[in-house]
Image: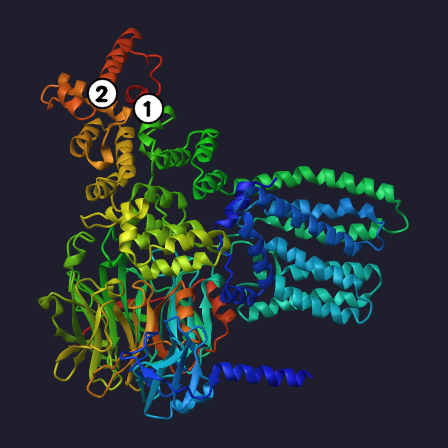
């Protein structure tokens, strides 16, 4: 008897979720209003099903690959089997049908273009988009091939403090670094199954280490050191300004616990920040601006250009010259977050009007620079009228994840865009969820610093928490030195 | 022992949502059932009386569960007074809001399990282990209480296997720590699990946790054959009576650790009971905090300038004082919001939005309204949709949703429209300068912001800056925010006019200027009378003018 009930219920479910073909009696000459807008996006073959919702109120259905999926309160959910089958194609056509006045009508079909696979994991911080409070935040990892999200660390385990700047070495989570601020403050360095807490403030640097980027050898991490402040605008739509009163770029030797810098990356008259290494490890890129006399009074006058300096990983020394790759201030712009593609050909950066904390600037857009020709162009298909900022390359250089406020203007969400061999972006898609509309509307956190990982971080939470709660015991920075290539 | 306003404030530290995600997410944490049920009860604490009734009812239920677990016959009523003792101290523990209400619901879960355990006849140790694990998952370290009490009862009855329950409970805690569900073993095994995780729990909260197993032991003793019912009852009642005084002291100490006045003021503020707020403020001594709430109530009643000098005023700190920490004082958000300084209101309201147990509903409301003023409808919709899932706020949220994507309705609404018009035109950072400077920018943008105008003039009056008062009057008199001059402003203007006549080099503001700017003949006459009375009193404060601005200006030290 029970078996029979199960069979009947399953049958009823299947009938509701995925039923026989509907023959539309008419067409509607527009694309369907859907959320998230996945029409004509390019997706990786291994991505989780891109469920989406029809935002109208009529009964709806989706026709794809000869199958019909009934919308449940507008939501179209793909079964894993169907989605896998769809992702085997190069292009998938979808048609949304709606029932109006008793008759089914078809909206204009749209397609998904399927391309190479993406790294399977994404790390990010979930944090209220604000202003100073961080009652609850955490660093998470998400399996991109399904909907599984797991906390790497949440601050309810560490006295409600702030944690930030989690960065892996080339997407390898077993080599990663992040900072813990306020209570139990320090820099946490994960190396395989070993974790250590570092005190990275020295007498020679203006702050503890801040924005990190791993050297491809995994022996060095470039950091900025910043005196950063934050203020809330009284009306400006950008709402918040985060600005530096001083900043420099240094390199930290993971093995020797030593930091070094070039006099050209630590100038009194300039603000240097957002360092990043080239994939061959021979160049250190960073942003640099002419320092101003009074901050925050002159904060709108601070504009960063894009520079690089040679770096020798053999002896941790720097080149003698600074090379300006993009004099953005001369054009009335500012750049931030330079990131070089894994093949070393392109450099993607965020361009905006002024300052360096582009995530709060609605004019921030992603731009690409060809490192061979120094030609630059905006990633038009990826950009939106709202903030498009912090970005990270996939290991195969074909995908980029970036933060965008295009949804509601305040809460950043991760978007993925395909980058072709010419450095041109395709229309991006929002990180998929089982019910994305409900999920993102309910979520009171912003996604911060999304970055790809090739595997999940396996270190037990209690081990991380225990080390965080310890005093920093390992890092005694030895004689910070300024080094130049002789 | 239990401050009803402190209980009511718990409701402002959470938002219980009738939402699948919220329910599942909360349940799927260690101690999730205790947390969820605790928050379920606290959602009704918007009424202080209801808060008190529910809390006392649950404490009583706990004592009853303990009694029914310990009695072997229905007639063992002599155990009742003893059973009440731990709950008297639990009430004291709950007097501090840093101790979450889930402590009480966790106890109830543990005691319900204890009752079930005492009724099990076969495979008792197996059921005991199972119950210990379930209670740990559902209620957290209260499982240790269950295990300890069950072990005491079992061992008293020579059921030796029951001794295994405590190690099982400890193992559960160890497992929770290893899995990263709790930060430390201390949290996994002790009442600090239910205390604010970013604070250190005072030792006093241990008392009910120690007393519960002792009570179980005591009950086992007194229900034995050596004790007569009456004498057991008498001893129990005497012990309960003896415990009351230290319990009250503990409760008092717990209350002293928290800003009790704020709870009461916040209750009246979030319920917009301005008369209640004034009454509450007047019952307490003058401190800037109290004066700020009093003046806030007057401002919302539209009588700040008319009535403020009827009450004790001691300088502009009584109107607003900027705190260095924008993340703690909800009062600042209320005051900035009333002033029309919406950026500052939102800055503070967002930072105080994330409370220890979820979202602060009052701050979420302010955020939603400021987003409507900004025209950031997507974000406003997000906040309103959240509030809509909480029954107590549903109606309000639904009413506000009417403004979504409707600029015309927003601009026509007295509150939202006024807020939208009050965004400063001169760009700058909020809370960087003095509150007055920011307020002047707000008024500059929207001279029709009458509450902002009142606050600005009140600030200047309290600062005794009568020259600037005159400047504001000169600039804004006759505009929508200052169509007439309230009496204290007239008094200030008149005084300044008199002052300019007596000081060489000052620009003289003659009587005609004063009349043209709203000073009435009646004020002229009263000023003359005040001057005469002052001369007569020989420099002392003349009688009958205590509620005049002249009295404040000349005789009040700030």
Give the residue number, with chain letter if any, for mark 1: B557
Q: Secondary structure at mark 1?
A: loop
Asked if badge 2 and badge 1 are on a common chain, one would say: yes
Q: How many marks?
A: 2
Q: Quadrant of residue B415?
A: top left
Give the residue number, with chain letter if any, for mark 2: B520
Judging depth in this view, the residue of A222 and A245 nearest the camera is: A245
Residue A145 placement (x, y as % from top left) = 42, 83
Indicate the chain on which mark 2 is placed.
B
Kindly identify the residue that appears in the image at 15 percent across and 57 percent down.
A292
Q: Earlier in the sequence, mark 2 or mark 1?
A: 2
Q: Please indicate, yes or no, whether residue A375 appears anywhere in the rendered image.
A: yes
Q: Is residue B297 left or right of residue B52?
A: left
Quadrant holding the N terminus of chain B = top right
Q: Quadrant of residue B442?
A: top left
Kindly identify the residue that appears in the image at 45 percent across and 52 percent down.
B395
Is disc 2 surrounded by few (<14), some (14 to 19) or many (20+) residues within 10 Å?
Answer: some
> Does residue A42 lie above or below B221 as drawn?
below
Residue B316 placement (x, y as % from top left) = 31, 33
Residue A344 placement (x, y as % from top left) = 22, 84
């Amino acid at each position: 008897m029970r078996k029979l009930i199960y069979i009947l219920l399953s049958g009823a479910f299947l009938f509701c979720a995925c039923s026989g073909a509907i023959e539309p009696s008419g067409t509607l000459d527009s694309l369907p209003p859907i959320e998230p807008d996945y029409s004509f996006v390019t997706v990786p073959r291994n991505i989780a099903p891109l469920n989406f919702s029809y935002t109208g109120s009529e009964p709806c259905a989706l026709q794809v690959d000869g199958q019909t999926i009934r919308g449940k309160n507008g939501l179209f959910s793909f079964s894993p089997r169907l989605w896998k089958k769809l992702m085997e194609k190069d292009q998938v056509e979808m048609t949304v049908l709606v029932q109006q006045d008793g008759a089914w009508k078809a909206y204009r079909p749209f397609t998904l273009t399927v391309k190479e696979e993406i790294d399977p994991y994404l790390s990010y911080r979930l944090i209220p988009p604000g202003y100073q409070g961080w009652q609850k935040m955490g660093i998470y990892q998400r399996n991109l091939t399904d909907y599984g999200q797991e906390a790497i660390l949440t601050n309810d385990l560490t006295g409600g403090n702030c944690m930030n700047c989690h960065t892996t070495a080339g997407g390898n989570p077993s080599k990663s670094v992040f900072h813990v601020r306020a209570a139990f403050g320090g820099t946490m360095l994960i190396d395989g199954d070993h974790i250590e807490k570092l005190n990275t403030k020295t007498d020679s640097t203006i702050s503890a280490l801040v924005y990190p980027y791993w050297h491809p050898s995994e022996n060095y991490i470039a950091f900025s050191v910043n005196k950063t402040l934050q203020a809330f605008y009284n009306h400006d739509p950008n709402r918040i300004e985060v600005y530096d009163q001083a900043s420099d770029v240094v390199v930290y030797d993971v093995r020797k616990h030593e930091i070094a810098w070039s006099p050209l990356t630590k100038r009194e008259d300039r603000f240097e920040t957002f360092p990043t290494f080239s994939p061959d490890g021979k160049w250190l890129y960073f942003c640099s601006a002419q320092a101003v006399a009074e901050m925050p009074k002159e904060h709108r006058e601070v504009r960063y250009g894009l520079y690089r300096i040679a770096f020798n990983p053999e002896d941790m020394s720097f080149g003698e010259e600074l090379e300006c790759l993009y004099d953005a201030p001369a054009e009335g712009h500012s750049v931030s977050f330079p990131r070089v593609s894994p093949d070393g050909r392109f450099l993607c950066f965020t361009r905006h009007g002024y300052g360096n904390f582009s995530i709060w600037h609605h004019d921030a857009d992603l731009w690409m620079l060809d490192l061979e020709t120094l030609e630059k162009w905006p990633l038009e298909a990826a950009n939106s009228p709202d903030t498009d900022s912090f970005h990270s390359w996939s290991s195969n250089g074909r995908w980029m994840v970036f933060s965008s406020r295009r949804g509601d203007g305040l809460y950043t969400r991760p978007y993925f865009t395909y980058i072709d061999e010419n450095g041109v972006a395709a229309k991006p898609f929002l990180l998929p969820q089982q019910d994305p509309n409900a999920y993102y509307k309910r979520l009171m956190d912003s996604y911060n610093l999304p970055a790809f990982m090739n595997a999940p971080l396996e270190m037990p939470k209690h081990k991380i928490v225990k080390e965080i709660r310890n005093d920093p015991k390992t890092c005694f920075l030895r004689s910070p030195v300024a080094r130049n290539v002789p | 022992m239990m401050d009803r306003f402190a209980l009511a404030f718990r409701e402002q530290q959470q938002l219980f949502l009738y939402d699948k995600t919220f329910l599942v997410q909360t349940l799927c944490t260690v101690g999730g059932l205790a947390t969820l049920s605790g928050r379920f009860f606290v959602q009704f604490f918007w009424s202080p009386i209801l808060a008190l009734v529910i809390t006392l009812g649950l404490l009583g239920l706990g004592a009853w569960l303990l009694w029914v677990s310990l009695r072997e016959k229905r007639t063992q009523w002599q155990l009742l007074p003893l059973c009440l003792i731990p709950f008297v101290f639990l009430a004291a523990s709950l007097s501090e809001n840093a101790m979450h209400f889930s402590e009480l619901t966790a106890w109830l879960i543990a005691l319900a399990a204890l009752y079930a355990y005492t009724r099990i006849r076969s495979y008792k140790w197996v059921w005991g282990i199972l119950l210990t694990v379930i209670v740990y998952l559902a209620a957290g370290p209260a499982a240790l209480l269950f295990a300890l009490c069950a072990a005491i009862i079992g061992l008293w009855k020579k059921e030796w296997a029951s001794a295994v329950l405590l190690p099982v409970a400890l193992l559960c805690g160890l497992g929770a720590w290893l899995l990263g569900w709790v930060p430390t073993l201390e949290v996994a095994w002790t009442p600090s699990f239910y205390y604010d995780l970013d604070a250190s729990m005072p030792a006093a909260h241990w008392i009910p946790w120690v007393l519960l197993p002792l009570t179980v032991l005591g009950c086992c003793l007194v229900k034995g054959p050596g004790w007569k019912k009456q004498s057991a009852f008498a001893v129990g009642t005497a012990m309960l009576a003896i415990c009351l005084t230290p319990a009250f002291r503990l409760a008092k100490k717990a209350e002293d650790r928290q800003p009790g006045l704020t709870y009461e003021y916040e209750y009246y503020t979030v319920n917009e009971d301005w008369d209640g707020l004034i009454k509450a403020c007047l019952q307490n001594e003058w401190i800037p905090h109290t004066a700020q709430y009093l003046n806030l109530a007057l401002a919302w009643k539209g009588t700040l300038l008319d009535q403020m000098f009827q009450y004790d005023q001691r300088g502009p700190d009584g109107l607003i004082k900027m705190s260095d920490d924008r993340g703690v004082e909800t009062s600042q958000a209320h005051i900035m919001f009333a002033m029309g300084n919406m950026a500052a209101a939102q800055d503070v309201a967002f930072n105080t939005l994330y409370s220890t147990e979820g979202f602060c509903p009052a701050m979420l409301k302010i955020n939603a309204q400021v987003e409507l003023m900004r025209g950031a409808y997507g974000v406003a919709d997000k906040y309103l949709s959240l509030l809509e899932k909480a029954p107590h706020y549903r109606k309000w949220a639904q009413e506000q949703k009417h403004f979504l994507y409707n600029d015309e309705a927003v601009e026509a609404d007295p509150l939202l429209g006024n807020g939208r018009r009050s965004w400063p035109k001169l760009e700058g950072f909020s809370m960087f300068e003095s509150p007055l400077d920011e307020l002047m920018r707000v008024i500059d943008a929207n001279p029709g912001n009458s509450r902002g105008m009142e606050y600005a003039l009140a600030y200047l009056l309290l600062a005794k800056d009568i020259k600037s008062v005159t400047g504001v009057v000169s600039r804004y008199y006759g505009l929508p925010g200052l169509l007439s001059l309230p009496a204290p402003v007239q008094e200030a203007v008149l005084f300044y006019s008199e002052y300019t006549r007596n000081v060489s080099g000052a620009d003289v503001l003659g009587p005609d200027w004063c009349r043209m700017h709203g000073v009435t003949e009646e004020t002229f006459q009263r000023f003359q009378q005040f001057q005469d009375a002052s001369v007569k009193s020989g420099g002392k404060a003349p009688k009958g003018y205590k509620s005049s601005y002249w009295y404040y200006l000349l005789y009040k030290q700030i």
